[in-house]
Amino acid sequence: MGIETLEQQESVSSYEVPPQYKGWPSELVEEFISDGPIFVDDDKNVTEGKMRQGIIEASKKAEVDRETRKRADITERYNNLSVQQIAEFPDAQKAVWDVLARHVKQEGNIDDLSREEHYVLGKLQIECKEFKEQNPGQLFHINLPAGSIDEQVRDNLLYRLALKRFGSEGKQSESQQSKVRDEAVTPNVESSIGDRKNLSGWDANFELAKIAKQNNIDLSIMSREEYAQFAIDNSLAIDDDQLRMSTWQRNIPSFSRLITERKRRKAELDGSEADKLFAEFDYNMREKARTNDRYLGNGIKVRAGTKDSNSWLFFGINGSLEDSHGQTPKSYISLKDLGALTPNRFILFMEALRDAKYDGDIKSFQDLANQGVLLNDQLVMHGRTEDDAKLALQVAESFFGKEILSKGMGMDEVVDGKNRSYSQLLATKIKESIN
């Protein structure tokens, strides 16, 4: 290992992993926070980039520290074995390696996996399945990069399972105590409601996916309100992150599968002509938002807030909201083929809204491949009135037709002096109903 520079040491020590990401594999933290947009303001680019990198590095350090503590505990347990047990230990290691191989091939199952163990083995299961499909009859080898955190997790798991055979598994780590059930196991729908109440966010999302699969329910075709009610009915507190995400993610039962599918879908669009066109459009709109002339045409203008936003491009149509207070009615859509949403087509849609006498705003994602592909709300219309929001949805249905994947209506509100999105309000309703 190389010696860290002072700057690297400061980047780790200056940032902490946000509470919602603590205990997550660093690869997940990087996936969820690293795809930030590029700002016109270079200083903001530097600040945001340093913050994201600092959190990622802090997550990686926490991960290494966790596995180092595990290995120290394993070493202590091993040293306490009898001479006879130490002599038998290599045979125990061979046996647990076979158990791990069967788990990866989904021919068996290892119980009591920690979150990180579940994640690493889940990725191996996906690799094994894809390898078998592409190479029938050939043997899949479990190969992990030497020295990688995944290799450390796997090796510590093998040692732990081997020690368990001698009644010397040792104390569970915090992450093991908050274990995640293996996705290959069919969930018991009659499980304790109290156990389900301990799950939230993505863990709750994955458990809902397992319950839905057992009951032959396709969560992706539910409306946002139906999905929220399904969560309430099953005492699983999903939050606004899951409610905002594209509906295909609802049916995925684990982080390993979620990240694999996210990467696949991003890769399909990343660097494509559609992606390049939208990146250029994003840059041009940010530049225009910094000027006094922000009109794209009669009745359509770039909102000034676009230049400072870290996730959306904002536009005003006819009687724009400008500064909204109180309730804000909204409608939203997502598309089956995101690549078809070219900048020119988006502008044509805004012209259709203008011509239909829609008064309000519209916002779109900034990054087509890395952001848009993950969102349920790819185009969001904030109407001046509820009738405007309904009109916007009608125009969208007429303009995009069968290309629409999902659609809906909602209402943003100010609660205790803070702006709350419709998804946040639904998430609060879910938690209050479950509790």
Image (cartoon, helix red, strand yellow):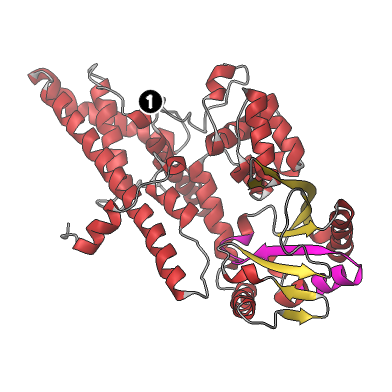
Residue under the image location 85 percent in, 60 percent down? 392
Towards the viewer: 427 or 387: 387
Towards the viewer: 411 or 245: 411
Does residue 430 appear left or right of residue 105 in this picture?
A: right
Does residue 94 appear left or right of residue 346 in this picture?
A: left
The N terminus lies in which quarter of the figure? Answer: bottom left
Does residue 161 appear left or right of residue 353 in this picture?
A: left
Question: In the rendered image, which quarter is residue 425 located in?
Answer: top right
Residue 230 drawn at (x, y percent): 71, 31
* Residue with the mark numbered 1: 177
Residue under the image location 63 percent in, 76 percent down? 289
Question: In the rendered image, which quarter is residue 25 located in?
Answer: top left
Q: Is residue 217 above or below residue 380?
A: above
Residue under the image location 19 percent in, 29 percent down? 73
| Magenta span of residues | 347-372
Does residue 99 appear left or right of residue 387 in this picture?
A: left
Residue 94 on the magenta span? no
The number of numbered discs placed on residues in the rendered structure image is 1
Question: In the rendered image, which quarter is residue 210 located in?
Answer: top right
Q: Secondary structure at mark 1?
A: helix
Farthest residue to the left: give it.
83
Q: Is residue 241 above or below residue 378?
A: above
Residue 199 drawn at (x, y percent): 53, 29
Towards the viewer: 137 or 394: 394
